[in-house]
Amino acid sequence: MPKQWEVMQDKVVIITGATSGIGRGCAEVFGRAGAKIVFTGRDEKRMDEVKSTLSALHIEHSGYIMDVSQEKENEKLVANTIKKYGRIDILINNAGISMRALLEDLDMEVFRKVMDINFYGTVYLTKYALPYILQSKGTIVGVSSINGHRGTPARTAYTASKYAMEGFFEALRTEVMKRGVHVLVVSPGFTGTNIRRAALNERGEPQGESPRDENQMMTPEKVASVIMKGIRKKKRDIVLTTQGKLVVFLNKWIPGIMDQIVYNHMAKEKDSPFR
């Protein structure tokens, strides 16, 4: 048995946004390692598909359709988890939504929606799960983004939500560092997920086709494996992909030059708003 699997056996893991992408990858990878999976999503059909997959793998699980942007639904999720399993060992805040539009064209309801899901959804669930994670001396994971380190044009709301998440977890980590709780923030580079296809345009509608080649990206299962290894090794931060690490490094040292580099790179995207 791989070493990282040893620390997952019979652990209760909550994963938000697990009906696709990185969340679903985490549900399968952590479940195969022996964890009991509690997962959320908003699409009933996809929820049923994940349940069927986990059942076929003989993974103990519970799935809940919920909107993470609603505080009471997060509180209820924690209560249901404790009622069924009696504990929470790992919380993976993965649920998120993106957007793609220039700020001057953007309906502010879209900005608020992105913040409500990506940032406040993370805050709500972490708040209600924290007492139980303190009891178990467990782990809280925030799935952030390279956008939490370097803003990109036409993604102002998404960037803001990820910068806010980074600051939130940095402060929380310091609050609980002497109480046995591990806080890990993972910043994937471009990953083959549904998030770009579901990204909202200026009117709040899904953009549909991704502007990037999804087949050339890191798989969600690979990201999930890295997250599990990071939990075992009690990592503080993980930045994924060579490109992602390079962007974070260069943005610290040559931020002005990076402004131009990022602009030029994003302007080349399919259907770029700069054209």
Image (cartoon, grey):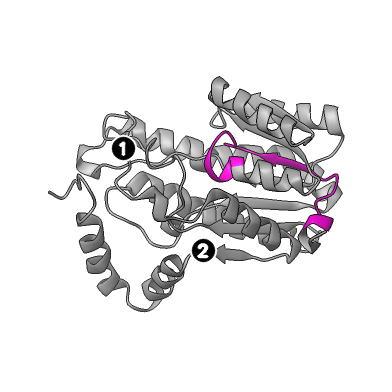
Kind of residue indicated by mark 1: Glu
Residue pictured at 48% horizontal, 35% vertical: 116
Query: Which percent across, then down, holds residue 197?
Result: 37, 38
Classify residue 3 by image quadrant: bottom right
What numbered label is drawn on residue 64?
none
In the rendered image, residue 10 lying in the magenta stretch gets the answer yes
Q: Element at badge 2?
A: loop
Q: Position of residue 271 (x, y in %)?
A: 19, 44
For label 1, count other residues whose C-alpha is less than 10 Å away and answer few (under 14), some (14-19) or many (20+).
few
- Name which quarter of the figure residue 64 lies in: top right
Q: Residue 240: which disc?
A: 2
Relative to 269, residue 204 above or below: above
Span highlighted in magenta in the image: 5-24
Furthest-bottom residue in view? Answer: 253
Confirm whether residue 72 shows in the render: no
Horizontal and vertical percent for residue 187?
52, 58
Relative to 66, residue 238 above or below:
below
Q: Is residue 73 left or right of residue 111?
A: right
Furthest toward the left, the residue is 275
Disc 2 crowd rating (10 Å Cα; few below 14, some 14-19, many 20+) is many
